[in-house]
């Protein structure tokens, strides 16, 4: 697991639980501090004993020009969170998008639900690009995106164009929640706290909140959404399902999702 910072990551717990359940006792998975400047050398140092890598911020975009092949979804999103080493070839994948779709489906949010109302994404970074792609998988063709700085939306705008998604940028604040049926918050822990109070003041509150934070949990936003009866999807749900898909890519075997879930929840409780 490469990124900066990565010391807090729960990914090693999930992957190691999967390898143990699959009987791959000789497999290792660890968090390695690595920034953009160190990424080329890190990739070059990975020999034939490496199956692949997981990537977190700030490396998901930076890795693309260093790869031999990029799967179409990762190219559309503009970021890869998984690198598979196969026959001396570096292949980039994005498991965040299907991970989001799986997490939402687990809570009853599926394509063609026939519901009305806007879908709103808070944040404009790499995870927001993945969220936009997940909405497309759910049958949406547009989304409102609430950002704090509309001067830093070039990457998301480009990704939306590649996906064929229409994006409306709105100010980052409680007003963005009005008329929304599904809200995806992709901002760091604490950044969405000012939005929490709005849930109790909107005439028709959003029916679903997906907050990509998993620690600390619940967030103020998640608490507020649950308080008005909304379905709440946590960042742990995303972490679990994107990790399960990584395990399948790296090992070629079905992921033991329930064993991974149990190990992750136990670690979070600690």
Image (tube, rainbow, N blue to C red):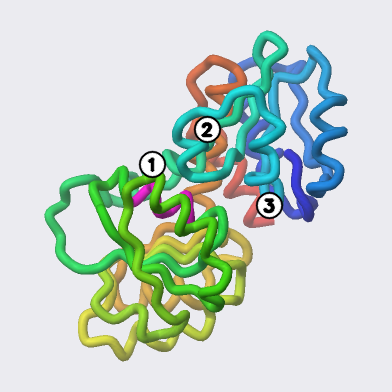
Q: Quadrant of residue 106?
A: top left
Q: N-terminal of the two: label 3 or label 1?
A: 3
SS type, badge 1: helix
- Main structural element of the magenta stretch: helix, strand or loop? helix
Q: Earlier in the sequence, mark 3 or mark 2?
A: 3
Question: In the rendered structure, which disc, 2 or 1, sits on the residue that comes first in sequence?
Answer: 1
**Quadrant of image for the C terminus:** bottom right
Residue with the mark numbered 2:
244
For the point 74% across and 54% down, which residue is it? 8
Q: Cβ–Cβ below 8 Å for labels 2 and 1?
A: yes
Q: Residues within 10 Å of mark 1 (few under 14, many from 20)?
A: many
In-image side of 77 versus 231 (left or right): right
The magenta segment is: 129-135
Depicted 131 relative to depicted 85: above or below: below
Q: Which residue is mark 3?
A: 57
The residue sitting at 28% across, 81% down in the picture is 178
Number of marks drawn: 3
Secondary structure category for the residue under label 3: loop
> Which mark, residue 102?
1
- Does 132 appear in magenta? yes
As drawn, 201 above or below 233? below
User: Which is more toward the observer, 133 or 1?
Assistant: 133
The picture places residue 229, in percent across and down from the top left corner, at: 29, 72
Q: Is residue 193 left or right of residue 43?
A: left
Residue 230 falls inside the magenta stretch: no
Distance of mark 2 from mark 1, alpha carbons? 10 Å
Seen at 86% across and 42% down, the residue is 38
Furthest-top residue in this view = 87
Left or right side of 250 for 103: left
């Amino acid at each position: 697991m490469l990124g900066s910072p990565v010391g807090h990551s729960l990914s090693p717990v999930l992957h190691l639980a999967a390898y143990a359940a699959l009987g791959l006792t000789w497999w290792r998975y660890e968090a390695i501090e690595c920034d953009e400047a160190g990424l080329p050398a890190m990739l070059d140092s990975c020999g034939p004993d490496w199956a692949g890598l997981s990537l977190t911020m700030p490396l998901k975009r930076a890795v693309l020009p260093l790869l031999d092949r990029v799967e179409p979804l990762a190219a559309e999103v503009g970021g890869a969170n998984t690198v598979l080493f196969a026959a001396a070839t570096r292949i980039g994948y994005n498991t965040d998008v299907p991970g989001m779709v799986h997490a939402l489906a687990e809570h009853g949010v599926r394509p063609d639900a026939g519901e009305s109302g806007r879908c709103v994404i808070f944040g404009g970074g790499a995870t927001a690009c993945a969220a936009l792609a997940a909405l497309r998988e759910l049958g949406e063709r547009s989304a409102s995106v609430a950002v704090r700085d509309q001067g830093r939306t070039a990457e998301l705008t480009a990704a939306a164009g590649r996906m064929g998604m229409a994006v409306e940028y709105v100010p980052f604040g409680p007003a963005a929640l009005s008329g929304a049926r599904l809200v995806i918050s992709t901002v760091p822990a604490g950044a969405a706290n000012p939005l929490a109070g709005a849930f109790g003041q909107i005439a028709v509150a959003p029916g679903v909140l997906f907050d990509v934070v998993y620690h600390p949990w619940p967030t103020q936003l998640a608490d507020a959404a649950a308080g008005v009866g909304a379905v709440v999807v946590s960042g742990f749900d995303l972490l679990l399902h994107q990790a399960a898909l990584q395990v399948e890519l790296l090992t070629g075997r079905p992921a033991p999702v329930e064993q991974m879930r149990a190990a992750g929840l136990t670690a979070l409780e600690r």
